[in-house]
Amino acid sequence: MDDQKLNLKGSPSRDAFKQWHKTLFPWLYACDADFILVNKNPPGIVAVLDYKTQKDHVTFSEVLAYNDFVIRGIPVYIVVGCEPFQQLEIYLYLGGNSQPEPPQVRLELIASTNTRLEFALWESKIRQEWQYANQ
């Protein structure tokens, strides 16, 4: 990965578009997928990661999108923590109901990491499992 990609933190124009989209008709729902792990060879989506702080919750639109990912066999993980991202809890999204407010979701705590290396090893493991299943 080159330094330009490594140092990219976000796109002001993408954020502006998402904010603009919110001003359209209120029934034009959207979901901003946080982070999608992909594999180059074989090509495919390994998993979806959604980063949350302790105060964040899975939203209505996220439940809709995540249920669809799960139906398609793409696991969704909710990663909970705070900067500097050392201690993270990783939950597997098992499903949810978007109708109540707030939505109801089923999560299973599957890992806790205390270092960058532990998180990298966890991610490497799910990537290896995906590659094995998709060869």
Image: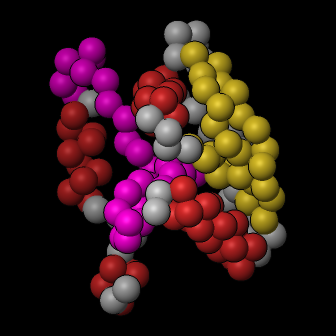
Quick check: is 36 in the magenta stretch?
A: yes
Q: Position of residue 39 (x, y in %)?
A: 41, 66
- Relative placement, left or right, of 112 versus 134 is right
**Residue visible at 71% across and 34% down?**
107
Q: Which picture quadrant has residue 26?
A: top left
Nearer to the camera, 123 or 102: 123
Describe the colour scheme in one phrase.
secondary structure
- Relative placement, left or right, of 134 versus 7 is right
- Relative placement, left or right, of 7 versus 106 is left
Q: Position of residue 98 (x, y in %)?
A: 52, 17
Nearer to the camera, 110 or 28: 110
**Residue visible at 30% across and 85% down?**
4
- Relative to 78, is 124 above or below? below
Nearer to the camera, 47 or 60: 47
Q: Position of residue 50 (x, y in %)?
A: 54, 48
Quick check: is 47 in the magenta stretch?
A: yes
Instruction: Note whether residue 84 is visible.
Output: no
Furthest residue toward front: 135
- Relative to 95, is 12 above or below? below
**Residue visible at 35% across and 63% down?**
43
Furthest residue toward top: 100
Instruction: Note whether residue 82 is visible.
Output: yes
- Relative to 97, is 83 above or below? below
- Tell me the quarter of the image containing the N terminus: bottom left
**Residue visible at 54% across and 56% down?**
133
**Which span of residues is magenta-colored?**
23-52
